[in-house]
Image (cartoon, rainbow, N blue to C red):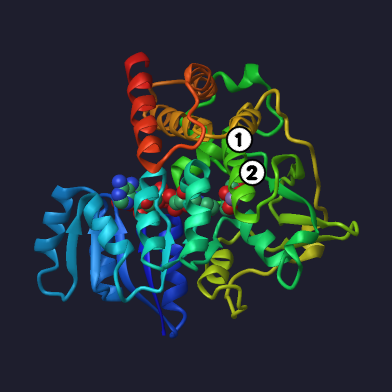
Amino acid sequence: MKKIAILGSTGSIGTQTLDIVSKNDDLQVVGIAAGRNIDLLEKQIRQFSPRLAAVGDEKKAQELKLRVQDTDCKIVGGMEGLIELAVMEEAEILVTAIVGMIGICPTVAAICAGKHIALANKETLVTAGHIIMPLAKEHNVKILPVDSEHSAIFQALNGENPKTIEKLLITASGGPFRGKKTEELKNMRVEDALKHPNWAMGQKITIDSATLVNKGLEVMEAKWLFDVDLDRIQVVVQPQSVIHSMIEFKDGSIMAQLGTPDMRLPIQYALYEGERKYLDGERLDFAKLASITFENPDMETFKGLPLAMQASKTGGSMPTVFNAANEKAVALFLNRKIGFLDIYEIIENAMNEHELILNPTIEEILNIEQDIYKRIEGRW
Ligand SMILES: NC(=O)C1=CN([C@@H]2O[C@H](COP(=O)(O)OP(=O)(O)OC[C@H]3O[C@@H](n4cnc5c(N)ncnc54)[C@H](OP(=O)(O)O)[C@@H]3O)[C@@H](O)[C@H]2O)C=CC1
Ligand SMILES: CC(=O)[C@@H](O)[C@H](O)COP(=O)(O)O
Ligand SMILES: [Mn+2]
């Protein structure tokens, strides 16, 4: 029996992880955590009988405690509670399905406690990859990619020598605004940006997909996961989201992973640490598909990608600035306080104003996050 804990069990990745667990008798959920959605957490406690449930919001944790008094599930709250879940003794793997930099501390704690990480929470690796990757090595912990592109690369690497990678080809859908120009983007509303052409995901990543910030975050995530320099990572727009990413090897051979857009596949592949198992769901029908097309990303219009590349090349604390500014800007956009294009302006200003720290500690990363948030709040 493989025992797993899920940080972010009520979200898009979290609920799909539970779907995989419900269909496999050799998987057991021992811990779950969410931010505020205690209605769904309660249902999950009653269905999966975890030993521990953590709620980010302390008040909601107290409320949930009263609601599930009749069960054996212990309820904990706040960051302390998330960390208790991350290190819980019974769990072998922690699925980091939480959104944003709040995932950093629980992920670090889990690694130090020797838990393998099924990593969806890309923001943690983008901001603290220089700490996470060596720490995982030190504790003999596997970082198993859940993000579809990184899972595709992980799958294509199976049986290959990573030293023979020539370059990584990360595919992008192009998002809901693919083909549009800056003038047209000015008036795009939240509803427009939330219409992803192929994937059903949480709101934050869906907006990131529309700005191409998601692809920028994924380039940085790939750099850390596969130890490949930025100049050997190419983004290719593949609008149908059928090819989830590719590796070009030294002999010119290219390995790609294809499939329908279903996140349960990468989640399952990570939970089983690279072992293939049956998965229900739609199969690719090439006759129906008819064509798979490719384009270069429009880096002039969708500045999320070039800004991310710039942040990554600068290194040190700059990816944290890029990510924190984006997290705040996306929250403001979702609350209809700013326009779509303001997201780029907020990120660019934050990066221009930042005094670089070369090798930031976790404490410095979290301080920068708070500082960026305050600066943006003061202005918008
Ligand atoms: N969705 C997808 O298909 C993909 C997602 N990812 C990455 O996976 C991560 C999760 O994305 P997604 O599932 O879409 O996000 P969702 O917004 O759907 O879910 C986020 C989860 O995090 C929880 N959460 C948020 N804030 C807190 C907090 N302060 N304390 C504790 N829990 C909190 C939410 O709880 P609550 O419901 O209570 O708010 C929810 O369970 C992101 O980093 C994303 O980039 C990567 C590839 C694909
Ligand atoms: C499912 C997944 O992994 C997402 O990160 C997806 O890649 C988003 O699509 P975009 O290619 O539009 O960013
Ligand atoms: Mn992805």
Of mark 2 and mark 1, the one earlier in the sequence is 2
Mark 2: which amino acid? Val
Q: Quadrant of residue 283?
A: bottom right
Question: Nearer the observer, disc 2 or disc 1?
Answer: 1
Residue 260 is labelled as none
Along the viewing direction, whichever of 312 and 71 lies nearer the viewer: 312
Q: Residue at x 49, y 62 (%)?
A: 138
Q: Is residue 260 left or right of residue 267?
A: right
Q: Quadrant of residue 10?
A: bottom left
Above or below, 143 against 36 in this view is below
Above or below, 149 against 257 in this view is above
Q: Residues within 10 Å of mark 1 (few under 14, many from 20)?
A: many
Q: Is mark 2 within 8 Å of ligand 3?
A: no
Q: Is residue 251 left or right of residue 186?
A: right
Which residue is disc 1 drawn over? 312
Along the viewing direction, whichever of 9 and 349 lies nearer the viewer: 349
Residue 81 image point, x, y percent: 23, 57
Which residue is disc 2 drawn over? 219
Q: Are marks 2 and 1 in contact (CB under 8 Å)?
A: yes
